[in-house]
Amino acid sequence: MTSPDSGVPRLVIAAPSSGSGKTTVATGLMAALTGRGLAVSPHKVGPDYIDPGYHALATGRVGRNVDAYLCGAELVAPLFLHGARGCDIAVVEGVMGLYDGAAGEGELASTAQVAKLLRAPVVLVVDASSQSRSVAALVHGFVSWDPEVRIGGVILNKVASDRHEGLLREAVDSVGVPVLGVLRRAPQVDVPARHLGLVPVAERGSEAVDAVTAMGAQVAAGCDLEALVGLARAAGPLPGGSAPWTPGPVPTHHPSRSVKKSKPRVAVAGGAAFTFSYAEHAELLAAAGAEVVTFDPLRDEELPEGTAGLVIGGGFPEVYASELSANEGLRKSVAELALSGAPVAAECAGLLYLCRELDGLPMCGVLDASARMSERLTLGYRDAVAVSDSALAGAGTRMRGHEFHRTVVEPGAGTAPAWGMRTPERRVEGFVERGVHASYLHTHWAAEPGVARRFVERCRTS
């Protein structure tokens, strides 16, 4: 194993555009290297929650995100090192095209920026299905665009035949970039998608396992694993001063306090309907002194005994609206907790679950609002400021977040809104009522660890 301080061997898997095969190659490479006995650390550039689930399945380790917009460029290397602690190699899957980032923000949040911050070599996955010699011009353009981005090799995807492969190799050779793999079309590695992207691992069961196994076999057969590992090992040390991020020490409390008060139980929604969560959130809650327990709103008929606070992240409640609505016992349990004034933090799917109804089906009724599916996709980074004091953030707290949904909540904000959006347009959004903080905005608490500490302290004293 390699010590993080000496520089974790690492690769960034990128592409000219979305749909080129990054997820297949990155997940397959993780699975292939894990199959060879390496401890592989999986990472994903950007706010995506779904790809890390496939990464976790491939490696047996928690999939983690590195996002320079949500967390700031200064936290990219520390969060990466936190996830890669004790691993032999790290594989980072990019987002969109290599140089695509936050709209109107230059390279911010792009795969290229993360690769530079991590001083990691890039492997470019090219969809070669409709080109031959032109691939040389494409690769040359990506190699020469930013001299600080080191493209160490190319993997040619969706190659039709041996003859097609020969033409492509000859073209790429002329650019001076090695071809590190050639993959044929393979339907068995395809992952089904729907309105917000790929179907999460938690919803597919054995099908997801089979798909990841197929990805690993395809990459092992079509790629030069030794060359890829060698490229990763040539990454060298990370920028000076980089140290692993830590959620912080567990606080100590006066021994006269009761066990319940000193270590409040925070229930975190999980299961197939609520799969969107950053691993660091639970780590921060635990470091702030909480006992973190997971429950499944599709199966559990009441909240865990002794629940003092509730966190409901994102996911696909609209897909499971009937099942969620039918679980009246849990809906009642959630409503009672919220009405008692206990802290509740809800993001996106959690917001929908707390509404009066979703697509006409009864939900928890904590908020006097209704939610419905929409044809319009709301997507993008947001620069936000807390409008109202809540269990999660004090008024004036500034955080960056991300919205990604095809639903509408009416009204869009309560009397005391959760956030004021500074970008892309000025508006208020979300609800702060009693101990509830509910919003469409996904945030990464590592950027502002105080929100977890504030939430746990409210759980302790409410």
Image: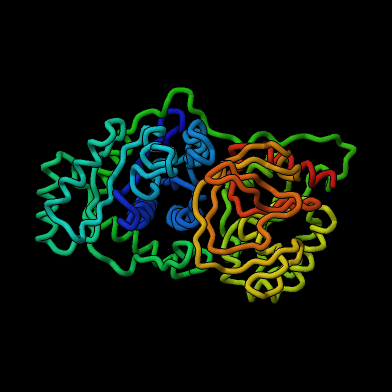
In the rendered image, residue 346, in percent from the top left (x then y), is placed at 67, 55
Q: In this view, does 183 lie to the left or right of 1?
A: left
Horizontally, is 111 left or right of 63 in the view? left
Frontmost residue, 342 versus 288 = 342
What residue occupies the far front of the structure in this picture? 426
Is residue 264 rendered to the left or right of residue 174?
right
Which residue is rendered at x = 59% and y = 45% of the image? 426
Residue located at (44% from left, 66% from top): 208
Q: Which of 177 and 218 is in front in this view?
A: 177
Question: Which one is nearer the viewer's eye here, 14 or 424?
Answer: 424
Whether residue 149 is situated above or below residue 189 in the rendered picture: above
Q: Quadrant of residue 9?
A: top left
Q: Residue furthest right?
A: 256
Query: Which residue, as the protein is rendered here, is positioned at the far top?
Result: 240
* Residue at 88% from the left image edge and 40% from the top image edge: 257
Quadrant into which the N terminus falls = top left
Residue 19 spot, x, y in % from top left: 33, 58
Q: Can you say whether 179 is above or below 53 in the image?
A: above
- Residue nearest the viewer, comparing 4 with 309: 309
Q: Position of residue 90 (x, y in %)?
A: 40, 42
**248 to the left or right of 208:** right
